Image: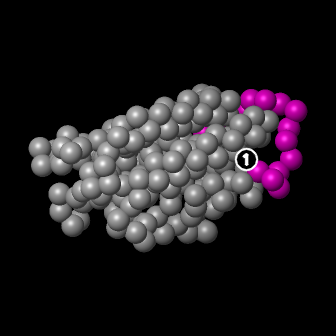
Amino acid sequence: MLTSKQIIEDCLQKTETNIERVKSTYSSLSESQFNWKPSAEVWSVGECINHLIVTNELYLVKIEKLITLVAENTETDFPYSQSFMGKLIAKSVDPANVRKTKTFKVFLSKESKVERSAIEKYAASSEKLIGLVSKMQNLDLKKIKLSSPVNMLIRLNLGDPLIIIPMHDERHINQAERLMRLERFPRE
């Protein structure tokens, strides 16, 4: 059985890895490469990164507000299991699941042309997640609940976003890397 401590450690490690991948893979792209799209319905590298910023911020606001309200325990580890909805969401965003899924409007960026500064914004957003997760060491991630950014009626365990966010990030980082491997991708 998973524990809160394992969820926290895994989230921290995967988030650090995702930050490094984004910085090392996309920092050298030109503005035109960063915004290149093979067709109107496919996201550019920049749109993939911007989508992560928008999505993660919606979760981070909820997490930040919640952890300021809950009292810490003296214990440092608790048994953990995902909520039913948390499992469904995690399965849909799992990087191993390459099937396309429809994105809820709340998670869409309003910008089609994305500035390369999105790389640093993504890193800052991910660092904020790391800071918030570091404050959860003495929290029971299964008992504390938060609502989904999609619908307030969807309830998640506090640990669910710690599983979902790094998986979702990896999924879209992989998507952007596949885009860069296309033969038509500009080689400036």
Quadrant that contains the C terminus: top left
Q: Residues within 10 Å of mark 1 (few under 14, many from 20)?
A: some
Q: Give above or below for 84 relative to 163.
A: below
Q: What residue appears at the point 35 percent right and 40 percent down from the top-left corner?
A: 28
Task: For mark 1, give the secondary structure.
Answer: loop
**Residue visible at 36% across and 37% down?**
25
Q: Is residue 55 above or below residue 160?
A: below
Q: What are the residue bounds of the magenta stretch?
A: 67-83
| Residue that carries the numbered disc 1 in the rendered image | 143
Rendered location of residue 119, percent (x, y): 46, 48
Say if the magenta span includes residue 176: no
Q: What kind of residue is marked 1?
A: Lys
Quadrant showing the N terminus: top right
Query: On the image, which quarter does residue 39 sit in?
Result: bottom left
Query: Would residue 30 be seen by someone viewing this image from the given angle?
Result: yes
Q: Is residue 44 visible?
A: no
Assess whether residue 69 is covered by the magenta stretch.
yes
State the image coordinates of residue 184 (x, y, percent, origin top left). 12, 49
Among the 4 quarters of the image, the one containing residue 77: top right
Q: Residue 20, relative to residue 92: is it above or below? A: above
Q: Is residue 86 left or right of residue 131?
A: left
Q: Is residue 188 above or below residue 43?
A: above
Judge by depth and name the residue closer to the eye, 46 or 9. Answer: 46
- The part of the image, by quadrant, that contains residue 156 is bottom right
Main SS of the magenta part reads: loop
- Tell me residue 110's x, y (percent): 42, 71
Left-right relation of 50 to 143: left
